[in-house]
Image: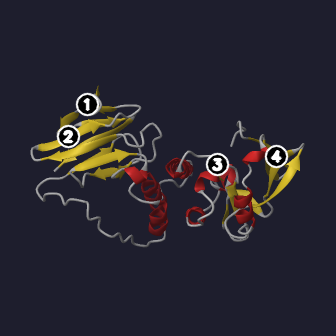
Amino acid sequence: MADNEIFTEMKCGANFAYILHDSSRFLTTEYKVLQSQTRRCFLRSMKMTCNGKTELYYMTDGCKAFSTLTPVLSTDRFLAVTGNLLDAVSEVKSNGFLACRNLDIAFEKIYIDMSTYKVRLVYLPIDTPLFEDDSEFENELRAGLIKAIDNRSDKNAPELKRLSADLADGTLTLEETAIRMRGGKICREPEPSVSPLPKERSMSLVTMNAPRIELKVTKDEFIIGKKVSRVDGAVTFNRMISRVHCKVSRKSNGYMVTDLNSANGTFLNQERLIPEQAYPVKNGDVVRMANTDFQVIIK
């Protein structure tokens, strides 16, 4: 992670440190929680002072950066490490005191314990998170893993192709992705608010120029965007797509698409839609959200 207005990064041999420009940003309680859990999924760290400023010093002994291991790990080992990474993130989510938004997940800052292949994460106990929200954090992590897979010589291995597709699928949580990696099955409680589709007709939006995802319209008002907690169909791999981008409406005489004041626009067959105005769509049409194209499939 590059230096910014909050801290400066400093290399210390194999170790590294962050020097806070303003020591008042340091969170004592989170640091104490972090110190009590360093034997779990976090890299060992300590608070020091450098020229009168707070220094967060991280020790990488026995570990190597994921960025250096990604190209050389065997397929099975890469999958195991990725599963351990998703488990570590899940552990942070369930902690109750710490937040994923404060994790530095640049691949050179994700460390692997070479004796166990467990993941060690870098946590910054500061009052200004590295990510705006959990959605942005997850998007960054998913994109990084997809890129890592794409750069591997065995990227067409069935297990890696499936993992890449699952990471690009915004309807799967990271926890569910880890379950599928290990051959498990996902069981979800049915959502009472979801209206069943008529058997004779259904609509999906399928990506045309991006990692393949399929958004199946399952409600009369189906919201699409990148913020998982606010939409029915999540598209998490593209930062250009707004948190709440557009919606598909199911009517008695067909389907309509409406732009919801998105930052980078919604297009139907290359024509930009006027926000808050519904447009009819038919089978084969192309809906563009920002710079990602989806084909309309009605059957």
273 to 6, vertically: above or below: above
Q: CA distance from mark 2 to mark 3?
A: 40 Å
Residue 222 horizontal side relative to residue 53, left or right: left
92 to 13, vertically: above or below: below
Which amino acid type is marked by label 3? Ala
Q: CA distance from mark 1 to mark 3?
A: 37 Å
Assess whether mark 4 and mark 1 are in contact (beta carbons under 8 angstroms).
no
Q: Position of residue 69 (x, y in %)?
A: 67, 56
Q: Which residue is mark 1?
A: 269
Q: Earlier in the sequence, mark 1 or mark 4?
A: 4
Q: Nearer the viewer, mark 2 or mark 3?
A: 2
Q: Earlier in the sequence, mark 1 or mark 3?
A: 3
Q: Give the SS element for disc 1.
A: loop
Q: Which residue is mark 4?
A: 11
Q: Residue at x 48, y 40 (%)?
A: 239
Assess whether mark 1 and mark 2 are in contact (beta carbons under 8 angstroms).
no
Q: Give the SS element for disc 2.
A: strand
